[in-house]
Amino acid sequence: MLYIHCPYCGELREEEEFHPKGQAHIARPLDPDACSDEEWGDYLFFRDNPRGIHHELWVHAVGCRKFFNVTRHTVTYEILETYRMGEQPTITAEHPEGRPSRDAADQASLREGVRA
Amino acid sequence: MSNVATFDTRTEAKIPVESPLAYSYRRSGAPAPTAKSRVVLRERPFLGHLVLRGGAIVLDEAVREVLGVTLPGEPQGLVHDADGRRSIQWISPDEWLVIVPGGEEFELENRLREALGGAHFAISNVGGGQTLLELEGEAARELLMKSVVYDVHPSHFPVGKGVTTVFAKTTVILRRPSEERWELVVRRSFADYTYRWLLDAGDEYGIGVER
């Protein structure tokens, strides 16, 4: 069993209460009509399958029923961080130990996002 | 004031109403509490349940004005009014559950709508869809430990907390209004399942059902 930190409930909850919903941070093309078939097909159907750090969308299905993002290691299954919708991860494949520069402006941009 | 059509779900006509557990009482029985009962189960049917959705700041103002309590803004918060019969609980960052004595919910809904005016919000009466079960007694926590995945130790689950969590194979809203009392808000379609689970799990504590 995993304990997953729900950023909206603000505490660790049982894995049973959550559902994974696939890759996170997939931006819809701004002008779908201008997409080639290949671009649109990539957007709809093709997902990353990295060995290592992966950003995923999860939902706290039994609980607050909010979607949020999870940074997870696909080899160890370790959950490195969870963060709200609209926020950016601090831990990425380029910065597995967390972002080096964490000044005030950086923090503000992390917190900027959809507020419930 | 919005132009939403509202109606009172309680009828004046003399139509017999039955609680979500009516069938369960007939089919599974209801063992009376004895001196040996370490936990007592009680249904509190026909209460008024309302779900409020919207921004915390706007709702807080209206709830303070109408109900006289502050909206629990922190996650897992549960607040009661002075006489303990009306409660409001945090469900999610933009959703709260209000439970009031049966019959009050329609007037409350209208007063809240009036207080909220043109704000962006939603109020739904969910009283027909769920019911409230109460567990009381020294073994209530032990019984819950067998049933829910959530940690119900007093250090982790103080009075005034409420969570939505997994109960056996269904879900409940679990809340702790006072030191010795626990409340389960269950969906009416799962009320029979929950009831039978509680009777079975509570057997070893001599569970009794107060009716």
Image: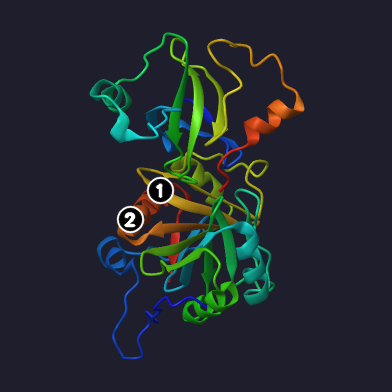
- Between marks 1 and 2, how big is the CA–CA gap? 9 Å
Mark linked to residue B171: 1
A104 to the left or right of A19:
right
- Where does residue B56 sit, x and y in percent of width and height? 62, 58
* Residue type of the residue flagged with mark 2: Phe
Residue B161 in sight: yes
Residues tagged 1 and 2 counted as in contact (Cβ below 8 A): yes
Q: Is the residue B183 above or below the residue A54 in the image?
A: below
Residue drawn at point x = 59 percent, y = 18 percent: A91
Residue drawn at point x = 57 percent, y = 24 percent: A89
The lab-note entry on whether marks 1 and 2 share a chain reads yes
- Where does residue B33 sit, x and y in percent of width and height? 46, 64
Q: Earlier in the sequence, mark 1 or mark 2?
A: 1
B49 to the left or right of A90:
left
Front-most of residues A67 and B138: A67
Q: Which residue is mark 2?
A: B190
Mark 1 element type: strand
- Where does residue B165 sit, x and y in percent of width and height? 47, 45
For mark 2, name the chain: B
For mark 1, name the chain: B
Q: Quadrant of residue B18?
A: bottom left
* Residue type of the residue flagged with mark 1: Thr
Residue drawn at point x = 69 percent, y = 26 percent: A106
- Name of the residue lying farthest toward the right: A104
Residue drawn at point x = 37 percent, y = 31 percent: A29
Within 10 Å of disc 1 (Cα), the crowding (few <14, some 14-19, many 20+) is many
